[in-house]
Amino acid sequence: MVSAAQTYDAIILGAGAAGLMCAIEAGKRGRRVLLLERAERIGKKILISGGGRCNFTNIHCRPENFISANPHFCKSALARYTPQDFIALVKEHGIAHHEKTLGQLFCDGSSHEIVAMLEDECTAAGVRILTDISVQQVSKEEDGSFTVRARDAEFRAPALVVATGGLSIPKMGATAFGYDMARQFGIGIRECRPALVPLTFTAAERERYCDLSGVSTEVIAKAGSQQFREKMLITHRGLSGPAILQISSYWNGSTPIAIDLAPGHELTATLRAEAANRNLASAKAAFRTVLPNRFAERWLDLHPPAAWTNHALADLEHNVHHWQVTPAGTEGYDKAEVTAGGVDTDELSARTMESKKVPGLYFIGEVVDVTGHLGGFNFQWAWASGFSAGQAL
């Protein structure tokens, strides 16, 4: 039998980064907060992030680092809770950390330190956390409160926060629960897709390149007006590495992406010099000065110049800086670091994350149509959106 409903000031569904931050802030303000997590432990995605060291924020965080149907929506939350705010919390707990590249901050030790910090903050704020709770039904009562029903318990509160994440990494427990909740209450969803995800080659391209799996080189990857200069990695199915993960969030699913394989270098300069040996062997030697040996040789075997004239060498130079690749697709949600799309920001208050049409209902974190670049930005959105909602509860 289900006992009488336990009452709280706020119920938060999902003990990931956003949910934990929201619970902490609401608890600090004296609210009686219940945090429900369907997994057996809190912060599972935090634990695996950054290779187990948690890339917990980025010191260069700006609204321009986020993708949304409304690019202005994230500005309010990001201004209210900055990377410096989270860094101060990390320092307060004595967690050693370092900047890796491009403003990315990681723990010196383990991501377990971040989860322990958030759990300690929840305890200090009086937050009650229940794990291994499978929510079966959510309803809104006549008095405006929300009732959350689990298998053998029932909870009620005037405020309900959905922090259940997106569809990425289903093996970690990702589900469509948050989107289902939005639809239940008539809240719009922007089409979801995998983001920060490896791209796959066509069968023909796999045949040409995938025996080079593990080869990595610095490139500029471009799609539309966006470009990223970072490492590209050849995999057994296609392309990955930071540059490719970044550009995948902007790829429209059909048009080619352009890859500059030698940014800042002119590979054919020595071939155009007087008395230079103009042949494939010389070209490969020139390409190997910048590109990994096997990849340099393979790319030239597949894209040899039409001739050895200056004009043909200029075309070769152009092609190496504008390699056109049309992916067959992506590796999908299994390998995606985040979900693009989600709860329509037009439906939410940018200041509080509260639904405009359902008072007391909030959506935060990855479930919302705000997607960060690679490098700690999605965590910063989780902290900022969770903080904003926690301040409003």
Image: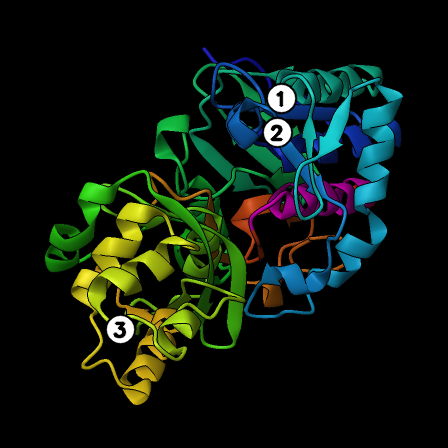
Q: Nearer the viewer, mark 3 or mark 1?
A: 3
Q: Which residue is mark 3?
A: 278
Q: Nearer the viewer, mark 2 or mark 3?
A: 3
**Relative height, residue 388 to residue 247 (above, below):** above
Query: Mark 3 belongs to which amino acid?
Result: Arg
For residue 54, which numbered disc appears in the image?
A: 2
Q: CA distance from mark 2 to mark 3?
A: 50 Å
Query: Mark 2 belongs to which amino acid?
Result: Cys
Q: Position of residue 290 (x, y in %)?
A: 43, 55
The quarter in which the C terminus is drawn is: top right
Residue 50, image quadrant: top right
Q: Earlier in the sequence, mark 2 or mark 1?
A: 2
Q: Viewed as shown, does residue 73 lie left or right of 314?
A: right
What residue span does the magenta drawing correspond to? 374-391
Residue 193, image quadrant: bottom left
The quarter in which the N terminus is drawn is: top left
The answer to whether residue 317 is seen in the rendering is yes
Q: Is residue 80 or residue 8 the one in the foreground?
A: 80
